[in-house]
Image (spheres, helix red, strand yellow):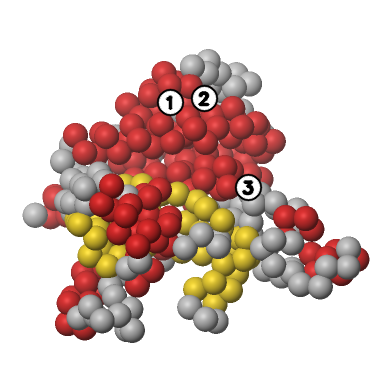
Amino acid sequence: MSQMEIVDLDSLLPSTHPYRRFQAYLPDATKALIEVSQLKGADGYGVERLFRCLLLQFMEDLSDRELERYLEENLAAKWFCGFTVSAPTPDYSLFTRVRTRIGTTRLSQLFATMRDQLKAAGLMSEVFTFVDATHLIAKATLWEERDKARQQKIEQLNNEVLPKVAADKQARIGCKGQKKYWYGYKEHVSVDMQSGLINKVATTPANLPDAQGLRHVCPTQGAIYGDKGYCTAPARQAAAQRGCHLAAIQRNNMQTKNRDRDRWYSHLRAPYERVFSQRPKRVRYHGVAKNQFAAFLQAMAFNLKRLVVLDADLVAA
């Protein structure tokens, strides 16, 4: 004799589950997505629901196919994205289309809306800001590009030649120090040192110096703590234009080098290096715009996880 039981998905999700806590920070922001973009739906699922799917993808570091299966099998994922137990979930091919429909510009507006909410809640003050950049690899090897360059009788493979022979026309060769080279992009990040939340994030070609990238993530006030890459004129100019004080570690050959002060700066910066600790170092897409889209989602996922930690600290206090 078969029995039928009506299951409430909400009752199956533990009250302490992280997804339930993420939910508290999303309603206003996802509403802003629809208001800003004026999108009414996407293949019957709705933009807000599919945005949550994309956010979940970066929380769990999933590919499109892995996300499709994750939504099919994981009840917590169904609950977070607004699906019922028996409702059909999106096919992996839909995620590419919804990323295009939302677009990088609309997502940047959504990220700004969430940042404004954090400021209004007193969680972000921009009094002290950590800035840094990390490498993002577009491709591990360039043997195919080298062979194409040789076929075109080009002797040297460099940033001027790569757009002619590479599939990703906007990726470049970057260098950190004198030994670390990579082909791809660079992600610039500013972190509010009061809460450890990401304030701004920008993706650029890998050959853009950190100091020049500061203008993309510079806060609107306060002090900026940077490493040796930010002690040059472009960074000082970007900080001055925003009315900020630049506290950058000096290079060893500078006459103004103060080792005690720079050790103190390094000590202050150390805890905020965690923003890069679990960040994937391989890009998902071709082009600056698409990888900027991914950077926004990655920053949103990081901030949601960080907010859960901050809530736990407040409860413990």
Instruction: Locate the N terminus by quadrant.
Output: top right
**Location of mark 2 (residue):** 47
Asked if labels 1 and 2 touch by Cβ distance under 8 angstroms, the answer is yes
The secondary element bearing badge 1 is classed as: helix
Q: Nearer the viewer, residue 46 or 162?
A: 162
**Location of mark 1 (residue):** 33
Q: What label sits on residue 287 in the rendered view?
A: 3
Residue most toward the left? 317
What distance separates the C-alpha of mark 1 from that of mark 3?
23 Å
Q: Which amino acid does the dot numbered 2 rest on?
A: Val
The secondary element bearing badge 2 is classed as: helix
How busy is the neighbourhood of tag 1: few (under 14 within 10 Å), some, or many (20 plus)?
A: many
How busy is the neighbourhood of tag 2: few (under 14 within 10 Å), some, or many (20 plus)?
A: many
Please state if 25 lies on the left or on the right of 282 as rendered.
left
Query: Residue 192 appears at what percent x and percent y?
Result: 25, 52
Asked if 172 appears above or below 22 in the picture, the reply is below
Q: Residue at x 47, y 26 (%)?
A: 48
How busy is the neighbourhood of tag 3: few (under 14 within 10 Å), some, or many (20 plus)?
A: many
**Sequence-first tag of 2 and 1:** 1
Q: Which amino acid does the dot numbered 3 rest on?
A: Gly
How many discs mark residues in the rendered view? 3
Q: Nearer the viewer, residue 287 or 8?
A: 287
